[in-house]
Amino acid sequence: MSGTTSEPRRPAQRSVLRAVALPSEHGGWGLTAEPVLLGLLVSPSLSGGLLGAAAVTAFLARAPLKLALVDHWRRRRLPRTVVAERVAAGEIALLGVLLAGVALRAGSFWWLPLVVAGPFVGVEMWYDMRSRSRRLTPELCGAVGIASVAAAIARAGGAGWAVSAGLWVVLAARSIGTVPVVRAQVLRARGRAARTGRLWVPEVLAVMLGMAAWLAGGLPWVAVAALAALSVWSLWSLRRPPLPVKVLGVTQMAIGFALVLVTAGAIGLR
């Protein structure tokens, strides 16, 4: 046998491009897919499909744009800054092409929900630029903002304003009730203290928003009942041992898609 010893393998490092281009927030995939799926199930159209592709592109563009903004905010220019700027520019250009395609095919005012959601996205980007995107405020604003895509897709497909707004409300309400609880559960799973005494407040608010949409004719009662059941389950889960973080993420994604299917099915049957 040879007396030479092999050097220990070093863990493979991600390329700069991959580190810049791929989002680090895994839960964001679900939050982006939910409104796209809900809008297309309720009001399918080619315009809605283009809008869905635009939503995914915007989600992907946020990662490099965030890095570029952070570096500019800190007045530094690193090798990753150049890569981030180029990737963001390409994805924003693609986003513009997709939105132009929607504008050529969709009905009137499909863009209004996106404009209304603009301030929420602006707040999220402001926190992103200051490297504070993990706080509650930007997480809630981002979730509420991306939920507007469901309303825009529904409008692009010809759905009425009440139903379109109802789709936005049900997903926004779900995030308002769920995000604070998930944050507390992550802290518990990591062995840290979490304040859970007032988490019933966002859960009640979520159900109240759903009821308001139901009274306005935008949501079926089944969707509101699903929101209420989700709120009860979320509060009950705080009394149980915390799930591992990965299991918690998969569970929340499954719950989100279940709410989408229940809502779309109930709207289709009424």
Image (tube, helix red, strand yellow):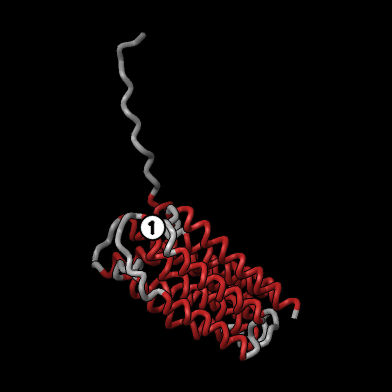
Splitting the image into 4 quarters, where does residue 37 fall?
bottom right
* Residue under pointer 1: 83
Residue 252: % across, % down: 51, 62
Q: Residue furthest top?
A: 1
Report the number of numbered marks: 1
- Residue 14 versus residue 261 in the image, above or below: above
Q: Residue furthest left?
A: 75
207 and 162: which one is in front?
207
Residue 243: % across, % down: 44, 55
Q: Is residue 5 visible?
A: yes
- Residue 107 versus residue 82 in the image, above or below: below
| Residue at image coords 33%, 73% | 127
179 and 146: which one is in front?
179
Give the quadrant of the C terminus: bottom right
Amino acid identity at mark 1:
Val
Q: Residue furthest right?
A: 269
Give the quadrant of the N terminus: top left
| Residue at image coords 70%, 83% | 158
Secondary structure at numbered mark 1: helix
Residue 240: % across, % down: 44, 59
Splitting the image into 4 quarters, where does residue 111 fall?
bottom right
Q: Can residue 161 be seen in this view?
A: no
| Residue at image coords 65%, 89% | 217
In this rendering, would 43 be left or right of 84?
A: right
176 and 74: which one is in front?
176
| Residue at image coords 44%, 78% | 202
Q: How crowded is mark 1: few (under 14 residues within 10 Å), some or many (20 or more)?
A: some
Splitting the image into 4 quarters, where does residue 138 fall?
bottom left
Residue 161: % across, % down: 64, 88
